[in-house]
Image (cartoon, rainbow, N blue to C red):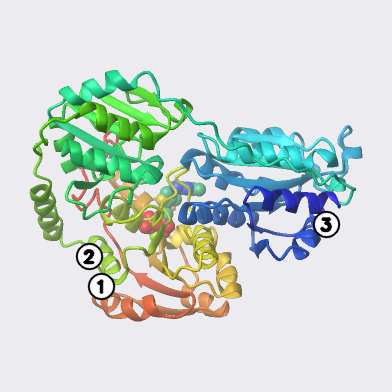
Amino acid sequence: MTGAQAVVAALLRHGIASGFGIPSIHNIALYEALRQTPAFTHWVVRHEQAAAFAADGFYRRGGRIAAIFASTGPGNLFTLVPLLESLQSGTPVLLVGTNIASSLLGATGGALHETPEQLEIIRPLTRFARRVSSPDKIAETFAEAAQALRGPLPGPAFIELPHDFLLAPAGAGSPSSPSPAARALPDEIMPAARQIASSRKPVLLLGAGAGNARTDVQRLAEQLQAPVFTTTAGKGAIPADHPLSLGCISRLGAVQDVLGESDLLLSFGARLTEFDTGRFGLKFPPRHLQVVEDPRSAGDRLPSTLIAGEIASIARTLGEESAPGAAARVPWCDVAAIRAREAERLEGLAQDGYTALQLLRAGMRREDVLVNDQSILNYWASAFFPVFEPGTFLYPLGSGTLGYALPAAVGAACAIRQAGESRKVVCVAGDGGFQYTQHELATLAQYELPVKILLVNDDAYGIIAFLQRSMFGQTHEVALKNPDFCRMAEAYGIRAARVATLDALRQRLPDWLSAPGPALLEWRTQLKAPWEAGAIPRPTGIALKTS
Ligand SMILES: Cc1ncc(C[n+]2csc(CCOP(=O)(O)OP(=O)(O)O)c2C)c(N)n1
Ligand SMILES: [Mg+2]
């Protein structure tokens, strides 16, 4: 067996049977081993950045880890931003990258793709980064990486292979990942249960980490009759139409009213980001119990008492211990009335962004997937798009980067195809963000991935223009001269259409959504940002120019 075959065997042994990448002279042996292994599915993309975003989308949609195959130097380094996104969002992905030949590693100068300290450049963006020290260590190194990937603090792992190891003879190895040890309940649980029992107005907040524990967390919310918010990353952890669901905290306003009245915040697997909390301006209840899988995953910018352990069993125990045999609680907050008031207020604003999301939601089934970039319509979506299942709303909140949506939608569509599901994938991006990774139209066309792209084109970095106007009364360097996006999509063999009004969007939407294969719909419009429209209070810290 060659080193390359040992790599592919190790991937399969650890349940990694899919990957995205680009072949190169350094990993060419790996591609030969992939060719020999029909059990492994590989998708070729047009940029390593896209491979890594696709692996992220693949996991977030389907819960399966994908490999990223990248070559020494540029190939590996092009994955840095996606690794940042996956790290900060707790998404496991495995970068299988090469380095120059082992015999050249000790000296410097002239080797193709030679990159100083490659491992050390990438390490801070991973939970595990290791150079394989000999071909016989391949199996062992992959076993260690698999353990990190499936541990309580998931994120990217990087395995670096000097390229000569791939053609060298290697031991097959048989280490499989040890099954995770059962975790004891944390000591803080009884005091926490007492706090909950004495709380009159508890509120729950669910982050991405609560998705897997949603049954237990939901039951706890029902026992407590507590209103439930999510973070942007946690959307779908409770169905938006659950009677206790109060939507996403990023919309502030009504959220602040409820939090202001509450005496206890109980959060599960939630990352309290600057984006979701109005630049950390959201005021929390006097007590915050923060339940996380791993203490290293919590931030300390907003104070809390940390309870670290398996979220599902903690939620279950908190339910049993805080309300043993007690009479059913009565709700302290009229969720239905709050939702109705808010919907009426939002509709009164008559904003095209909000209406477009309602049209989209109506055209999508509960299980369909929305993949976001960072544009004005995506900010509206974070705040107001109703989500019903985990893994159906992907948002680049780990890094806040542009260019996430299309390649992550590629990954989500591949996960759906692998699972034999029929979910739709809708990708929403602005003209600016879309151009970061638009080359992935080629991947959509090559594999006929049925991703529907809604491209909101205002010929501008629109949100930045809004911020500039707000802060300085002027704009600068935000106007974009764009290509003809429809002709561009058509050049890739992708059907495309353009609309210029909300009515035209309404009429086109059903055909676009039900088209077979990929399809791009360009919406030429000037959307108001939700802060400008009065749908979300303006972030604190931005001085507004008033004259
Ligand atoms: C890599 C990166 N560079 C810059 C930014 C800052 N940024 C955030 S939104 C945005 C404008 C995006 O323009 P577009 O995609 O057209 O969306 P619009 O705001 O016009 O709706 C910019 C430049 C960013 N988030 N990420
Ligand atoms: Mg724009």
Pointers 2 and 3 in contact (C-beta within 8 Å): no
Pointers 2 and 1 in contact (C-beta within 8 Å): yes
The image quadrant where one finds the C terminus is top left
The residue tagged 2 is 355
Query: Disc 3 residue type?
Result: Ala
Q: Residue 341 versus residue 399: which sits nearer the camera? A: 341
- Reading the chain from its start, which is encountered first: label 2 or label 3? 3
Question: In the rendered view, does 199 fall on the left or right side of 237?
Answer: left
Discs 2/3, front = 3
**How far apart are the two marked residues, 2 and 1, measured between alpha carbons?**
8 Å
Asked if residue 313 is positioned above or below residue 523 in the image, the reply reads above
Instruction: Please provide percent x and percent y for residue 68.
Output: 65, 52
Residue 269 is at least partly visible in this image = no
The residue tagged 1 is 502
Say few, some or many: other residues with alpha carbon within 10 Å of mark 1 (under 14 / 14 to 19 / 20 or more). Answer: some
Q: Residue 221 versus residue 541: which sits nearer the camera? A: 221
Residue 28 is at least partly visible in this image = yes
Instruction: Please provide percent x and percent y for residue 485.
Output: 48, 73
Pointers 3 and 1 in contact (C-beta within 8 Å): no
Asked which secondary structure carries label 3, the reply is helix
**How far apart are the two marked residues, 2 and 3, measured between alpha carbons?**
52 Å
Disc 1, ligand 1: is the CB inside 8 Å? no
Instruction: Please provide percent x and percent y for residue 246.
Output: 20, 46
Discs 3/1, front = 3
Question: In the rendered view, does 208 fall on the left or right side of 504?
Answer: right
The residue tagged 3 is 29
Q: Residue 330 versus residue 344: which sits nearer the camera? A: 330
Asked which secondary structure carries label 2, the reply is helix
**How far apart are the two marked residues, 3 and 1, measured between alpha carbons?**
52 Å
